Image: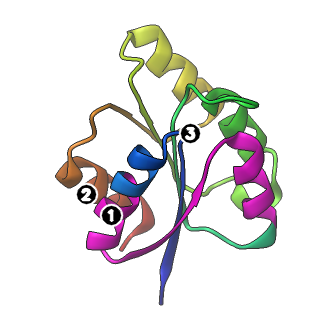
Amino acid sequence: MTTRALVVDDSPMVRDLHAFMLQSGGFQVDGAENGSDALEKLLRRKYDLIVTDINMPRMDGYELVRSIREIEQYKATPIIIVSTESEASDKSKGFEAGANVYVVKPAKANDLVLNAMMLTGK
C-alpha cells in the first residue's frame, strides 16, 4: 500500500528537499505552497501524513493544522511541523494546534523520515 504525504512550504527548494527525504523513505509525496493550497489538495485526495512549515503567506501553519483537525477524515492524520521557529512557545502552539511532532529547520533526513515512518506505521 502506498503511503501518501503532503509537504506544505512556501519555499520550492525546502518543499522539494522534504519531498526527496520522504521519497527516500518510500512515501509518495505531493507539495503545496501555502495553507490554502494544502486544504484544497487535502479535500481532493486522501493523505496519510502532512508535513508543514509555520511561516507561509495566506494561511500560516498553525491555522492550517487547526483547519486540518476540523476535517473529519483528518482528525487523526499525523502532522509534522518543520519550522525555523525554535522557541518553546512556538512548539507549544504547534502541539496545541494539533501537530504530532515539531522539528526545527534544517530538518535532518533521518529525523524527518523516522518520525514519518513511526507516525504512519510504515
Q: Is residue 44 visible?
A: yes
Relative depth, front residue between 17 and 111: 17
Whether 32 is among the magenta residues is: yes
Of pointers 1 and 2, the one earlier in the residue sequence: 1
Label 3 CA crowd tier, 10 Å (few <14, some 14–19, many 20+): some
Q: Which residue is mark 1?
A: 20
Whether 21 is among the magenta residues is: yes
- The residues colored magenta run 18-43
CB contact under 8 Å: marks 1 and 2: no
CB contact under 8 Å: marks 3 and 2: no
Of pointers 3 and 1, the one earlier in the residue sequence: 3
The label nearer to you, 1 versus 2, is 1
Q: Which residue is mark 2?
A: 114
| Image location of residue 31, percent across then percent down | 56, 59
Q: Is residue 28 above or below residue 81?
A: below
Disc 3 marks a residue whose amino acid type is: Asp
Disc 1 marks a residue whose amino acid type is: Phe
CB contact under 8 Å: marks 3 and 1: no
Q: Residue at x 33, y 64 (%)?
A: 20
Q: Residue at x 38, y 23 (%)?
A: 84
Q: Residue at x 56, y 19 (%)?
A: 93
What is the count of numbered marks? 3
| Image location of residue 48, percent across then percent down | 56, 67
- Model colouring: rainbow
Instruction: Give the side of residue 69 with respect to residue 81, left or right.
Output: right
Instruction: Give the side of residue 103 with respect to residue 42, left or right.
Output: left
Disc 2 marks a residue whose amino acid type is: Leu
Q: Considering the numbered disc 1 on the image, is that residue within a helix, a strand or a loop?
A: helix
Which labelled disc corresponds to residue 10?
3
Q: Is residue 69 above or below residue 90?
A: below
Q: CA distance from mark 1 to mark 2?
A: 14 Å
